[in-house]
Image (cartoon, rainbow, N blue to C red):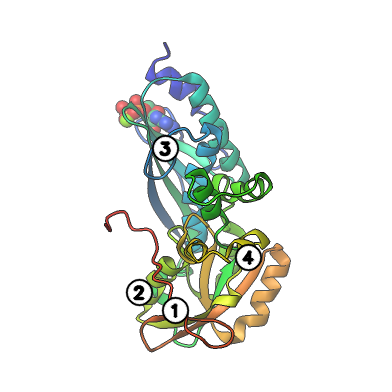
Amino acid sequence: MASEFDLIRQYFTRPTSHTNLGVGDDAALLTVDQGHELAISVDMLVAGTHFLADTNPRQLGWKSLAVNISDMAAMGAEPKWATLAIALLAADESWISAFAEGFFACAEKFRVDLIGGDTTRGPLCISVQIMGQIPAGRALRRDGAKAGDDIWVSGQLGDAALALNHLLSKHPLTDDELAQTLPALLQPQPRVALGLALHNVAHSAIDISDGLLADLGHILKASGLGAELCLDDIPRSAIMQQHLTRSSVLNMLLAGGDDYELCFTADADSHDRIMQIAQQLDIRLSRIGRTSAKPGLVIKDRQGNTIETGASGFDHFRQ
Ligand code: ADP
Ligand code: MG
């Protein structure tokens, strides 16, 4: 049976590219570029709460790092380093090896060094801390939105929620629909390049992890604003569009969560610049509404009818 230290050496120790001292000592050492701020965020993924216990370990490895990189994207930070604290029920090496493969596939794609962590026995739980850097003062904060800003969203929303609801036997999809929506759930692609391109363009940003309404709500609250959204402008896949005939699916679009797209606000004058960024990065960017000094979040259809959603994002402590 492999020891804790064998597991760390074999599965979680890889060469680093921009770290002074990585895995193996009591602490890692790193240098932040001059004139930059360090951006740090941590997330915990608990089996049964954040993922199904039988989730494929390779996909889980990818996702546990990707959701943290998404927080860097939302700040406009360049992700650089991560630590990984993991509790495992047993030293199941085929599971750990697949998990590490997915984790490092994501780390390599986004040029993140794994520089340390902790490995312990316990109910399956994964905590990743991510560190990145931002030119000082350039971070895309939640409290920077201004009244009259356009509200933008990247990509399309709700596919991850559709796939999850299928897996939970709550809303069946065809095999083909499942194949097309599953990647959004299992292998989210954090919008790092977009976050970096939005320096000096966006006034505020957040990544959509708990659903558009909840996460946009955080920007509005932090900035002391309200907003009006146009439902028809909220980007969705053709599959989502078809399923929207069922009213329960509206919640998946607006409040489903696990989208890992960016929601940001910017001056209306920045419209052309933002469309240029969309083209350069080959990302769909949609203007979905506008902020207002008047508090509250109103959603209307194109005809101007108010939509009652009753939807709110995911909250771990709400009953
Ligand atoms: P300590 O007892 O000093 O906390 P550990 O025995 O927990 O050290 O870890 C030994 C080394 O391995 C440390 O550098 C730690 O950061 C690293 N490490 C432990 N677990 C992991 C992991 N899952 N991924 C990456 N590095 C890890
Ligand atoms: Mg330790």
Which callout, 2 or 3, points to the residue nearer the camera?
2
Could you say which quadrant of the image residue 158 lies in? Answer: bottom right
Give me the C-alpha separation between circle 2 and circle 3.
30 Å
Of residues 49 and 133, the one drawn nearer to the viewer in this rendering:
49
Kindly identify which residue carries mark 4.
Answer: 241
Give me the C-alpha separation between circle 2 and circle 4.
31 Å
Of labels 2 and 1, earlier in sequence is: 1
Question: Could you say where residue 315 lies in the image, as x and y percent from the top left?
Answer: 33, 58
Residue 135 in view, yes or no: no
Kindly identify which residue carries mark 1.
Answer: 145
Kindly identify which residue carries mark 3.
Answer: 84
Q: Secondary structure at mark 3?
A: strand
Give me the C-alpha separation between circle 4 and circle 1.
30 Å
Q: Is mark 3 within 8 Å of ligand 1?
A: yes
Name the side, left or right, on which 271 lies relative to 260: right
Question: Could you say where residue 7 lies in the image, as x and y percent from the top left?
Answer: 45, 21
Could you say which quadrant of the image residue 24 lies in? Answer: top left
User: Badges 2 and 1: C-beta atoms under 8 Å apart?
Assistant: yes
Q: Is mark 2 within 8 Å of ligand 1?
A: no
Within 10 angstroms of label 1, few (less than 14), some, or many (20 or more) residues? many
Mark 2 residue type = Ala
Mark 4 residue type = Gln
